[in-house]
Amino acid sequence: MLKVVPLGGLGEVGLNTLVLEHGGERLLVDCGLMFPRGDQLGVDIVLPDFTWLLDDPAALKGVVLTHAHEDHLGALTWLIRELRVPVYGTAFTLALARHRLEEAGLDADLRLMAPREPFTISEQFTVEPLRVTHSVPDAVGLAVTTPSARLIHSGDFKLDGAPIDGQLTDLERLGELGEEGVDVLLSDSTNSEVPGWSGSERLVADTFKRYFAQAKGRVVIAMFGSHLHRVQHALELARSVGRKVALLGRSLQRNVKLAQQAGIFDSWEGTLVPYEAASMIPSRNLVLLCTGAQAEPRSALMGLLNPEPGPLRIEPEDLVILSARTIPGNEPNVTHVINRLLARRCQVVYSSIDPGVHVSGHASQDEQKKLIDTVRPRHFVPIHGELRHLHHHLQVARNAGLVDEKLFLMTDGDVVGFDHERATTFGRVPAGKRLMRREGLAAVSDQVIADRKWIAETGLVIAVVAIQMGSGKVVAQPTLNGQGLQADELAALPLATESAVRAVRELSDAMRADDGRVREELVRGIRRVFKQLLGTRPLIVPIVVRV
């Protein structure tokens, strides 16, 4: 049987990483990361747990990437450090993957694939990429054929009848494969709660055209750095009205450069200008495309809001368009940025007041149903989303005529096998999340996160005492230093210091020879003061120095 084993992306948005297993061989579809929640302090990224894959490294025959978003290829560098396997992708996807790998000082076997050109990865897997429309160029779904079953993986997709790059989702080929027989369809669930169809990117182009016509000063468009289709029609519009365009933000600049190198993006000579030249161009003749639609602290939009004088700052006559849907949970940050922009007396447009400034790159319910109707799979598994998205997508499948016995709600770590006749569950494999710093190789532990939350909520007291080695004599009495404490807590530090001194003094020389016992009494003495006086409980770090 063809076994499907998700290691990420089924139960959360992001982290998309899926293993296909057949005949003792494995194929990895995507290798994505996700970004941390606000309470995961000091964590830059979240990776899938690759332990199960690493336990049998010879079984993995390759990685196939569906597209160039971080939630589908961002974890690749961490995997390639452990497993040097071939990586397959389309031109732009490989360009971004190569850039990421080179940044990490890694080399990899990168292999170009193209839509409707099947290729064999191993004895067990033949893969045919299928063009899909998404918010990044060169996106594909996959038809994977094994001796026991054929699977279609939708990738991230939508059914836009007039995409900016002219690349339609290949419903014709999907229908042909459906006629031949598809044993299981795995389909993108991101917008399964949204009725109808996702709007066309042409709607955004028309909306931009309307705002460009009325703008008296600069037009500033904040967007995701990977949305190159939107960059393209913004450039076309700017050129048509005689405006120059500057790209602000490292990811946006990098992606445009990589797309140009991959041959899927024009040079735009004469329209694109460097940052240094932008400040010399009259406001009525300039467009700024920038990152920061999600209010990221270090984004280009935040730089434009810098209160200090500079060559490019938000001015009262500017028109600022936030061309992105706010990520759930990030609403307070985006609202704060909108208020800061309005405080500069500029015009601000965002999706809540004009839905035309952004459309989703993911299929809504009617598009999801259309894909199911086209493929007519024997079995169906919703992928890419939280449990609520997966559940709603199952209802879409029911509406398309699939009975419950053919529907499988899988989450990370579940194993389900498929062949031409049936589906069978096989229990679970280890799956989880690794909390990481972007430059680090070691995971941030749950205990570290808990300690950081404690410090953030209660403050920190560091207590240091010096004790003579061997004799147990106190060389220097305990001293306390507080960080993140309120004024009344800082005022209590002298009393807490006295309590710590007494606690150490009451220990015998023999007891003071035990570092653990000294630390325990320091904490007890200090905590007693804060609890009795203020009812607070700061994190106390006792340090015993032996001299």
Image: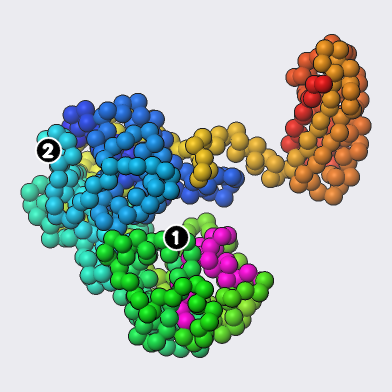
Marks 2 & 1, CB-CB < 8 Å contact:
no
468 or 50, nearer to the observer: 468
Q: Residue beneath label 2, please?
A: 420
* Secondary structure category for the residue under label 2: loop
- Please state which amino acid type lies under the numbered disc 1: Ser
Mark 2: few/some/many CA within 10 Å (<14, 14-19, 20+): some
What residue is rendered at 65% in x and 41% in y?
A: 452
Q: In x, y percent, where is residue 153?
A: 24, 48
Q: Residue beneath label 1, please?
A: 251
Mark 1: few/some/many CA within 10 Å (<14, 14-19, 20+): some
Which quadrant of the structure image shows residue 433?
A: top left
Q: Is residue 286 left or right of residue 262?
A: right
203 is higher (above) or lower (below) than 78: below
Sequence-first tag of 2 and 1: 1
Q: Which residues are magenta?
A: 286-307
* Secondary structure category for the residue under label 1: helix
What residue is rendered at 21% in x and 27% in y?
A: 24
106 or 378, nearer to the observer: 106
Q: Would you say residue 197 sits in the magenta stretch?
A: no
- Please state which amino acid type lies under the numbered disc 2: His
